[in-house]
Image (spheres, rainbow, N blue to C red):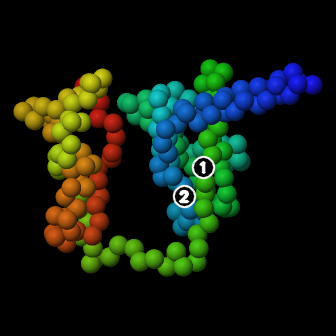
Amino acid sequence: MKAKIISILLSAFIGCLFSLSGYAQIERVEPPFWWAGMQKSEIQILFYGKNIADYQVSLQEQIPVTGVIKTENPNYLFVSLDTEGVEPGLLHFNFQKKGKKFTREYELKSRRENSAQREGFSSEDVIYLLMPDGFANGNPDNDSVEGLTDKVNRAEQGGRHGGDLQGILNNLDYLEDLGVTAIWSTPLLEDNDA
């Protein structure tokens, strides 16, 4: 009896490890959730994880994937789908590659009535477009990272300057003093171009 209990517990533990290993493939999802019932029903979700672009992606639910975009960096995968008529709840994305398979949940949340009444952008807003690399360098320690191809070289035309998210955070008061009400950043990606 004791051996049977140990066998069952060991099987459950191994099963948990395999399910967790699938989640380990994806380190980040952006946006972390979306709203059901939006006027524009096509959405795009970014999955980030080591070599995630090597996987084929599908949904368990009867919702077609309308597009998959892979970048030069294999750690990014953009997945588009149409959520028209889809009720709030969990979606289950299947990722499969050469016999390996794992599932990642993604939530479509319900919009509350009062949340739909929020004021959007207007002519009173000042939106500041910035490129983090050229805006401000808040942490020189991450300018040239070991293992990445691209290093800081301000002398080279088109070379990296070392700006980063910390530089933006350090200058929020400056932007507010300018009258900026929103920041529009160029895409935030791992900078590893050659």
Task: Say whether disc 2 or disc 1 marks the residue closer to the N-terminus.
Answer: 2
x and y percent of residue 94 in the render? 64, 37
Residue drawn at the location 60% of the way across and 62% of the way down? 109
Question: Which quadrant holds the C terminus?
Answer: top left
Answer with the quarter of the image where residue 88 lies. bottom right
Q: Which mark is residue 23?
A: none
- Disc 2 designates what residue? 34
- From the viewer's perspective, tell me whether residue 10 is left or right of residue 163: right
For the image, the number of numbered tags is 2
- The one nearer the camera, 161 or 187, is 161
- From the viewer's perspective, tell me whether residue 190 is left or right of residue 17: left
Calculate the distance from the C-alpha at mark 2 to the C-alpha at mark 1: 8 Å
**Type of residue at label 2?**
Trp
x and y percent of residue 56 in the render? 58, 31
Q: Which mark is residue 106?
A: 1
Q: Are marks 2 and 1 in contact (CB under 8 Å)?
A: yes
Residue drawn at the location 65% of the way across and 49% of the way down? 91
- From the viewer's perspective, tell me whether residue 181 is left or right of residue 50: left
Residue drawn at the location 16% of the way across and 70% of the way down? 177
Q: Is residue 125 visible?
A: yes
Does dot 2 land on a helix, a strand or a loop?
strand
Q: Residue furthest front?
A: 2
x and y percent of residue 126 in the render? 24, 70
Relative to residue 84, is residue 25 depicted above or below?
A: above
x and y percent of residue 9 in the render? 79, 29
Q: Is residue 77 visible?
A: no
